[in-house]
Image: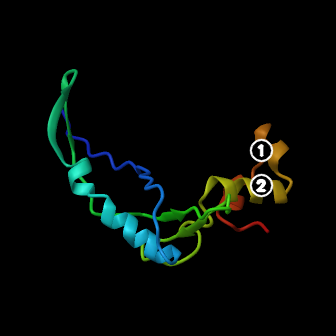
Amino acid sequence: MKFDIHLFPVVRVKVCGVEAPDELAAIKAAEGVVDFNFTFNHNSFPHGDNKIEMEYAEEVTCYLVDSEGDPDGVWYGPGYERGDPNPSGTKANLLDRILAEKKLLPMLLGIDPDLDKLIAGELR
């Protein structure tokens, strides 16, 4: 059997040196610089026995604004709302929560039965 599989990867596109009066203006200016349709919409190309097709899926999941002198940056969600767009799901946040619960060693040893609850935010 043969299948056509649609993969939806998240691709980071960094626009450097954006001049703007504030972070939201910088995001909108960066969006104006990048033409995702031109960048990602390719008819098709062969790859081994397969054919690869790409197109822009018309969605941006989040934005990270790195300001000069700010090593951490500021996250914005898809609707330009400020803050981590996925606060309970990021790897860094999950590791912080595991360490805060002192569950790291048992988890590494594979003896933590409550890890699923920790990930779901049920343990505090």
- Residue name at image x 21 percent, y 52 percent: 38
Q: Residues within 10 Å of mark 1 (few under 14, many from 20)?
A: some
Residue 84 drawn above or below residue 13: below
Residue sticking out furthest to the left: 43
For residue 98, which numbered disc appears in the image? Answer: 2
The amino acid marked with disc number 1 is: Met
Q: Is residue 1 visible?
A: no
Residue 107: assigned label: 1
Say left or right for 54 vs 23. left
Q: Does residue 18 appear left or right of residue 52 in this picture?
A: right
Image quarter in which the N terminus is found: top left
- Residue 74, image quadrant: bottom right
For label 1, the SS is helix
The image quarter in which residue 5 lies:
top left
Q: Is residue 116 above or below residue 44?
A: below
Please say if the residues under marks 1 and 2 sit with CB atoms less than 8 Å apart: yes
Is residue 12 left or right of 115 when viewed as pictured?
Answer: left
What residue is rendered at 32% in x and 45% in y? Answer: 7
